[in-house]
Image: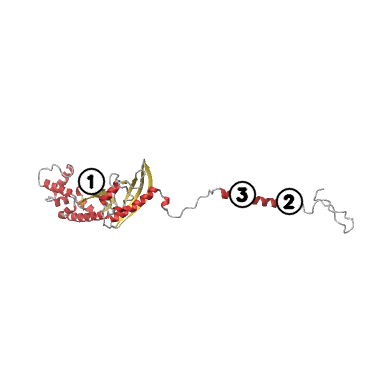
Amino acid sequence: MTDLDIQIDDPDDEIGAPVRVLNGDSIPPWIKAVTVLVLGAAIVLIIAFWFGRLKQETTPSLEPAAPATAPLTSTTVSPAIEVSLRAIDGWEQFARSGELSSVVDTFHPDGPQLALFHQAAVPGSVTEVAFAATNLSEARDGDLTIVSLDLEVTSQTSRATYPFDLVYLAGSDQVWTVVDRRAPDAPALPPAPVFIEAAQDVWGTFTVAMAAGDGAAVAPTVTADSLLLADQVVAAVAGAEPTRDPAVDNELFARLVSRGRQLSVADSGQALVAALDQGTREAIQIGELTDWRMADTNRLVASLEIGGEPVALVPFLLADDVWAFDLKGALESSDGGTP
């Protein structure tokens, strides 16, 4: 007999006789079993809860962080790129005002780029121009730090994008030089908008005069070397002794003389008109000058585009603060065809 067994007196006993509990208590066994299970489960849950909280507080979360929605700030870019952006801001101010004070802090005082700024400075001029740097990246080349970017320069008359590399010497936070990736040997200096406007005015006068065959109006728009070439052609057409030192190579000079004879040119203006055939004159009438860049500190080059396709380079030279179309250089670069 177990502790929970209960013994009842014989039914034949007298009614009302007391019930006798021989041993144990009055709780049924199934209730005790359920109670033990419930209490055990509660204890397990409590322990698991506190253990989980402790683990969460001491173990770093492996969940990915929420994507940042704030714009990039100076703390999200490298120091070299940050300096480059400041240099571009100063460069923009220099392009607007011609004041060297805008670039002396971010360009190295002994570097070739600041030397170019000295040559191009036109203090007191105010020009509407905007710079925008995109696609910035940083690389190392030995001791050099190179920040590559695309610099878009927009003025009232033009827009051009320059693929530039800003080069820093070891230990310096000032731009040493700027390299145009399209022409590494050319000076990296976007032309001042006033230069572009002046060259466009010259080009407009040249094309109108050329279309009309007005040699007298063409002559003031071209460089001194172009006029010298025209005079040599006139002399050759007139039957003078062969020019021993023509302004262009002998083969090109012979073609220009032949064209001059066909048109019976008698002066330099007529020789300038004869230098371009009718098809070329028509092309320059419908073409558009784009992608302006400095080929040298006094040489400005634009791309002549027709229907969005570049067909020729058009060079201009600066002499005595006056821009002129370099017809001689254009003929040499195109081998006698479109300038």
Tag 3: Cα neighbours inside 10 Å, few (<14), some, or many (≥20)? few
Mark nearest the camera among 2 and 3 is: 3
Tag 2: Cα neighbours inside 10 Å, few (<14), some, or many (≥20)? few
Q: Residue furthest bottom?
A: 16
Determine which quarter of the picture holds residue 99: bottom left
Tag 1: Cα neighbours inside 10 Å, few (<14), some, or many (≥20)? some
- Which residue is denoted by mark 2 in the rendering? 33
Q: Amino acid at mark 1?
A: Ser
- Which residue is denoted by mark 1 in the rendering? 333
Question: In what element is the residue under mark 3?
Answer: helix
Are the residues flagged by discs 2 and 1 in contact, CB closer than 8 Å? no
> Looking at the image, which residue is at 64% across and 52% down?
46
- Which residue is denoted by mark 3 in the rendering? 51
Question: In whole angstroms, how far apart are the C-alphas of marks 3 and 1?
Answer: 82 Å
Viewer-side residue, 256 vs 205: 205
Viewer-side residue, 231 vs 322: 322
| Circle nearer the N terminus (2, 1) | 2
Residue 153 can be seen, yes or no:
no
Left or right of residue 290: residue 10: right
Residue 215 coordinates in the image, percent (x, y): 15, 53
Left or right of residue 260: residue 120: right
Residue 47 can be seen, yes or no:
yes
Question: In whole angstroms, how far apart are the C-alphas of marks 2 and 1?
Answer: 105 Å
Q: Name the image colouring.
A: secondary structure
Left or right of residue 250: residue 75: right
Q: Amino acid at mark 2?
A: Ala
Viewer-side residue, 168 vs 257: 168
Q: Count up the numbered dots.
A: 3
| Circle nearer the N terminus (3, 1) | 3
